[in-house]
Image (cartoon, rainbow, N blue to C red):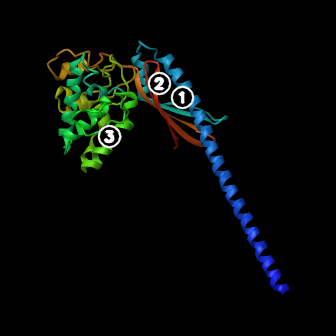
């Protein structure tokens, strides 16, 4: 009997030890997760500080109402890299022109009522793109896009727009959800073949906003002015040194068309300080990245992309 009691006591002791070890293991696992999460939070805080400093620098370099073509060309051509080996400080900033396509908001007829040419261009580009990439249900896709862009339910539409919080504004991420919805409903994979950001720009714009006449995409020029895409790519935005003046859209069209004047309500005659920027940085031996859009001393659509 004594042996039985000792066996039971030993078994209970082993169970208690196993339980304690299990609790310790869970605790260590939790601590590791907390430390990891704390590292992410600290990295996010660091990213927010860098974001604030970066936007302040951009405001100084590109003040509202003033455009320095050389600075823009340099920023777009050469990523800004800064490092200090002793402290481990390391950042990499890269920016690209943002309004290279038709603002998606121009598909809203209430937004373009004073400039009907904008709505006409937006509709033309959307139609031509759907034809070019053989979209199987173009009417349905157009209905869904316009319903979302307008931010209100169309009386002829079965779709309920999700963008009520800020009517008429579509970010690229939101637009991608529209494309996925269409793909799931109509099983049309062709919609994924369209380089949408080469034809449209996805950012909140004012009624004064126009397409960047210095950096407009080759694809949009081809559709808008009915020039073969290969011809545009051969001649538009050829590689030039920083010292050379960048060719304007008017100069390009004068060489390829009849030289008709550019509609300044659609395209700017010069470059615009409107850009999308991505910045990576080193924090505690790991690289993180965030992105944002910058326009006229205002930054929007900040997104912390996390560890890379």
Q: Quadrant of residue 259?
A: top left
Q: Which residue is mark 2?
A: 299
Report the quarter where the N terminus lies.
Answer: bottom right
Residue lying at the far right of the rendered structure: 2
Q: Position of residue 11 (x, y in %)?
A: 76, 76
The structure residue drawn at horizontal position 23% and vertical position 33%, both measured from the top left corner, is 155
Disc 3 from disc 1: Cα separation: 29 Å
- The number of discs equals 3
Disc number lying in front (2 or 3): 3
Disc 2 from disc 1: Cα separation: 9 Å
- Give left or right: position of 128 versus 300: left
Q: Secondary structure at mark 1?
A: helix
Residue lying at the far front of the rendered structure: 155
The structure residue drawn at horizontal position 39% and vertical position 28%, both measured from the top left corner, is 166
Q: Which residue is mark 3?
A: 178
Q: Which residue is mark 1?
A: 51
Name above or below for residue 236 compared with residue 7.
Answer: above
Q: Secondary structure at mark 3?
A: helix
Confirm or deny contact between disc 2 and disc 1 (CB under 8 A). yes
């Amino acid at each position: 009997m004594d042996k039985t009691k000792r066996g039971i006591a030993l078994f209970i002791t082993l169970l208690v030890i196993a339980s304690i070890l299990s609790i310790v293991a869970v605790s260590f696992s939790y601590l590791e997760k907390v430390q990891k999460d704390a590292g992410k939070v600290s990295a996010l805080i660091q990213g927010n500080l860098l974001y604030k400093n970066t936007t302040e620098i951009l405001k100084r370099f590109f003040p509202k109402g003033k455009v320095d073509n050389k600075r823009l060309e340099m920023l777009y051509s050469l990523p800004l890299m800064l490092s200090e080996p002793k402290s481990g400080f390391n950042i990499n900033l890269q920016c690209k022109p943002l309004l290279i396509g038709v603002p998606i908001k121009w598909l809203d007829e209430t937004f373009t009522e004073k400039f009907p040419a904008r709505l006409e261009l937006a509709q033309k580009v959307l139609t031509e793109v759907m034809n070019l990439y053989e979209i199987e249900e173009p009417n349905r896709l157009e209905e869904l896009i316009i319903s979302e862009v307008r931010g209100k339910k169309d009386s002829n539409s079965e779709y309920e727009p999700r963008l009520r919080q800020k009517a008429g504004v579509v970010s690229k991420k939101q637009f991608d959800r529209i494309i996925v919805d269409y793909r799931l409903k109509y099983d049309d994979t062709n919609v994924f073949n369209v380089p949408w950001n080469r034809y449209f720009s996805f950012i909140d714009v004012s009624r004064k906003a126009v397409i960047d006449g210095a950096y407009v995409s080759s694809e949009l020029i081809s559709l808008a002015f009915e020039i073969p895409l290969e011809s545009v790519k051969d001649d538009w935005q050829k590689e030039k040194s920083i010292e050379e003046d960048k060719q304007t859209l008017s100069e390009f069209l004068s060489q390829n068309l009849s030289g008709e004047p550019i509609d300044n309500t659609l395209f700017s005659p010069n470059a615009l300080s409107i850009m999308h920027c991505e910045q990576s940085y080193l924090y505690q031996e790991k690289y993180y990245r965030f992105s944002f859009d910058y326009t006229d001393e205002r930054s929007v659509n900040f997104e912390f992309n996390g560890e890379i």
